[in-house]
Every structure is written in C-alpha cells, then in structure tokens.
Image (tube, grey):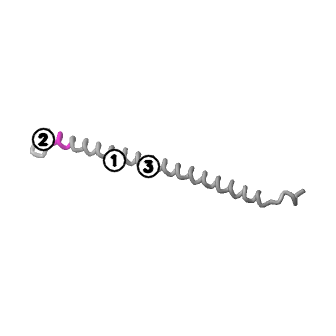
Amino acid sequence: MKDVPKVEQLESYLADKILEQEAIKKQLEKLRTDKEKETQMTQQKYEQDMKAMREEMQNKFQQILAKIDTARLR
C-alpha cells in the first residue's frame, strides 16, 4: 500500500494536467487568431496591389491611345 499514490497526489496531478490543457488551448486559440490576422493582411495587400496594377495598366493604355494619331488611321 506504500506504492499507491494518495488521493491528494492524484488530485494535484489532475489539477496540473487540467491547467496545462487550458494553457495549450489558449496557445492554440492565439495561433489561430494570429493566422487569421496574417491571412487577412495578406489578402488586403493582394487586393491593394491588384488595384494599383489595374490603375497603372489603365494609365499606360490611355497614354498609348493618346500617342496614336487618329488622323493617320483615316
């Protein structure tokens, strides 16, 4: 009977494990939140870059059209 853990020791062990599990859950939730923020920021940057590229292409197209002498085409 000496080798059998006491109830208090088991309770303490289980309480520690529960606390450990809660800490892991909090870490996991923080990682998820951080990943969602990172994904959102990446998507916003992509959308901004695409908008800028479209505007640049539109400006270049307008410059090309302005350079074309429509009188010569007739």
Please name whichever residue, 23 or 66, is drawn nearer the observer in this view of the structure.
Answer: 66
CA distance for labels 1 and 2: 32 Å
Q: Disc 1 or 2, which lies upstream in sequence? A: 2
Tag count in the figure? 3
Q: Is residue 35 left or right of residue 5?
A: right
Q: Which residue is mark 2?
A: 6
Q: Indicate the quadrant where residue 60 lies.
A: bottom right
Rendered residue at 77%/61% (across/down): 67
Q: Which residue is mark 3?
A: 35
Q: Is residue 9 magenta?
A: yes
Closest to the camera, between mark 1 and mark 2, is 1
Closest to the camera, between mark 3 and mark 1, is 3
Q: Secondary structure at mark 2?
A: loop
Q: Which residues are magenta?
A: 8-13
Q: Disc 3 or 1, which lies upstream in sequence? A: 1
Q: What is the x, y in percent for residue 70? A: 84, 57
Q: Amino acid at mark 3?
A: Lys
Q: State whether the magenta stretch is mostly helix, strand or loop.
A: helix
